[in-house]
Every structure is written in structure tokens, then in C-alpha cells.
């Protein structure tokens, strides 16, 4: 169980990116964060693992308040929180295998990682994960030789080699084409279920969120304005989160996109005032 209580992030300028956010995530639950740009989605994700320092509030993971930890205790807590980044955050000059093994930095330490001294069991796990994400043939390829979808798959393997209890995913499909986006989402959700991991996904694509995530949380101006199941996302909810829009046009565009990629158009039914 992850408990976020009264979380506030206020920048020196006075801007409040998060305003008294409280949220719980059950064990093995997958939750999607949606909302307009600037709503606080990425800030929330990054506060959970302290990439961004919260101003106040609590973030309790595995019974420990992440906000109160420092030094070694914080490093140990972060080992169980995996992160998949929007821009992949790979080291281009390193191989696919080296990038994946960098996910073990929290366990092996800097020098062992720098000298590529990993236990045989860890190396085998990396091979298994690369096979699982469809990159078994790219072990020795440099990261800068990969496509966007392949780079994202390396990021997935790197996060999972940590054996996390919680996986944070920040805009995993933002730079991907529609077909690859769905493949990546299927892969993430499949691996999360296989490994019994709680997962929070910040995603800008509402259609993908509805298709793949049972629970959706909507943020607007740093506040939670919706928390419910994906089938409750209708036109009125979208207007509340994003503002007034002709969602029928969006739906038609997505249906055309679905036809092009071979996906099921039924997922685009928003219900409500169509």
C-alpha cells in the first residue's frame, strides 16, 4: 500500500504545483494519472521518489515516510521504487545490457557498477528481461542505435531489474507512434501483473489510459478532481479535468487511428453527452 497524505509542492516563485494531494494505491494496483499540461502529474510522480522535493505532506511506501528519509535510508528506499522516464534517460554510448544493469546501481554501488562487476545471477536476470521485452538480439547494441520504442523497452527492463515494489511511469508513450504506444503499454501492464507490482502511470493519452488502466485519477491545477474506474470517464468528467472541448472530434480521430493500427474502436466510447 502506498499512502500519499496532504502532499504540497510549492516553488520559490510561489507557484503551487501540488495542492494538498491525498491518494492511496493498493498492492498490485495500476493507476493512471491524467490531466492537462501543468496539472501536476509529473511533479507528483517525481515527488514520490524524491526526484523533486515535496514542500510538505507524507508519502508512505512500504511503511516508511519517504519524505522524512535522507542519505543511506533514502537510497535503500529508492531501490524498491522503479522509474520509467519519458525521455528514456539512457546513456547513449553504453550498450543495451550496460544500460539495463545500471538499474542495479542501488544494490551494487558505484564502483562495482562502473567496473561492470555484477553477480552472475543479476546478469542472467538482465538477459531474461531483455528477452521478455523483445530485445534479446540487441544486448551489445549501443543505446543510440535504437528506435524510440526500443529505447523505451530498455528503460522498462532497467526499471524492473531493481525488483521494485512500486513502478513509476512518466509519459511512456509521449514520443511514440500509435501502434508502438499500445505495444509498450501492453508490455508494461503485462510485466507489472506478472511481477505483482503496484504501478502509477502519468499519461497524456486518455484513450490509452481507459484501455489499459482500471483506475484513473484526474488532476487539474495541482488538485485531484476525479478518482474512479475507467468506465466512469465520460464527456462531463473530461470537461471537468481538461475544460470544455468537442470530445466527439477526438473520438473520431482516435477511431481513424485505431483503424490504421488494427485496434478495437469500441474502447473509444466515452458515454455521457455524446
Image: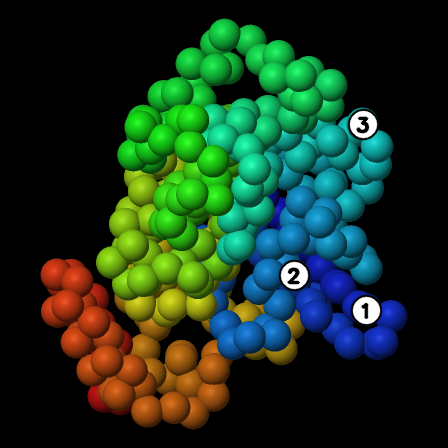
Horizontal arrangement in the rendering, residue 40 relative to residue 147 (left or right): right
Name the residue tied to disc 3: 72
Relative to 269, residue 161 above or below: above
Horizontal arrangement in the rendering, residue 120 relative to residue 138 (left or right): right
Nearer-the-camera pick, 190 or 133: 133
Q: Which coloring applies here?
A: rainbow
Name the residue tied to disc 1: 11
Q: Residue furthest right?
A: 12
Instruction: Please tell me which residue is depicted at 78% across the width and 53% down the height of the picture.
Output: 53
Instruction: Please tell me which residue is depicted at 68% across the width and 22% down the height of the picture.
Output: 114
How far is mark 1 from mark 3, CA to CA?
26 Å
Tell me the SS state at disc 3: helix
Can residue 83 be seen here? The reply is: no
Nearer-the-camera pick, 88 or 169: 88
Specify few, some or many for label 3: CA neighbours under 10 Å numbering under 14, 14-19, or 20 or more.
few
Image quarter hosting the N terminus: top right
Nearer-the-camera pick, 88 or 156: 88
| Mark seen at residue 43 | 2
| Mark seen at residue 135 | none
Image quarter hosting the C terminus: bottom left
Can residue 274 be seen here? The reply is: yes
Tell me the SS state at disc 2: helix
Q: What x and y, as percent, mark residue 245?
A: 38, 91
Q: What x and y, as percent, mark residue 108?
A: 66, 18
| First reached walking from the N terminus: tag 1 or tag 2 | 1
Tell me the SS state at disc 1: loop
Nearer-the-camera pick, 46 or 151: 151
Amino acid at each position: 500500500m502506498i499512502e500519499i497524505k496532504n502532499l504540497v509542492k510549492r516553488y520559490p516563485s510561489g507557484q503551487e504545483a501540488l495542492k494538498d494531494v491525498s491518494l492511496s494505491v493498493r498492492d498490485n494496483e495500476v493507476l493512471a494519472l491524467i490531466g492537462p499540461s501543468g496539472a501536476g502529474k509529473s511533479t507528483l510522480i517525481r515527488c514520490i521518489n524524491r526526484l523533486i522535493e515535496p514542500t510538505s505532506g507524507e508519502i508512505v511506501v512500504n511503511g516508511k515516510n519517504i519524505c522524512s528519509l535522507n542519505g543511506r535510508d533514502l537510497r535503500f528506499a529508492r531501490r524498491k521504487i522503479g522509474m520509467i522516464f519519458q525521455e528514456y534517460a539512457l546513456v547513449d554510448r553504453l550498450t543495451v545490457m550496460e544500460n539495463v544493469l545500471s538499474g542495479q546501481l542501488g544494490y551494487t554501488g558505484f564502483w562495482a557498477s562502473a567496473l561492470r562487476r555484477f553477480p552472475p545471477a543479476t546478469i542472467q536476470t538482465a538477459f531474461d528481461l531483455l528477452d521478455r521485452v523483445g530485445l534479446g538480439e540487441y544486448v551489445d547494441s549501443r543505446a543510440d542505435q535504437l528506435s524510440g520504442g526500443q529505447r523505451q523497452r530498455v528503460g522498462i527492463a532497467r526499471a524492473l531489474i531493481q525488483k521494485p515494489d512500486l513502478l513509476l511511469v512518466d509519459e511512456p508513450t509521449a514520443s511514440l507512434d500509435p501502434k508502438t504506444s499500445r505495444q509498450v503499454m501492453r508490455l508494461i501492464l503485462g510485466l507489472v501483473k506478472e511481477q505483482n507490482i503496484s504501478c502509477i502511470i502519468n499519461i497524456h493519452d486518455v484513450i490509452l489510459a481507459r484501455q489499459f488502466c482500471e483506475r484513473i485519477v484526474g488532476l487539474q491545477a495541482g488538485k485531484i478532481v476525479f478518482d474512479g474506474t475507467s468506465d466512469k470517464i465520460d464527456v462531463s468528467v473530461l470537461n471537468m479535468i481538461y475544460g470544455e472541448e468537442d470530445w466527439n472530434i477526438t473520438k473520431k480521430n482516435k477511431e481513424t487511428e485505431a483503424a490504421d493500427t488494427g485496434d478495437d474502436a469500441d474502447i473509444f466510447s466515452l458515454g455521457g453527452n455524446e
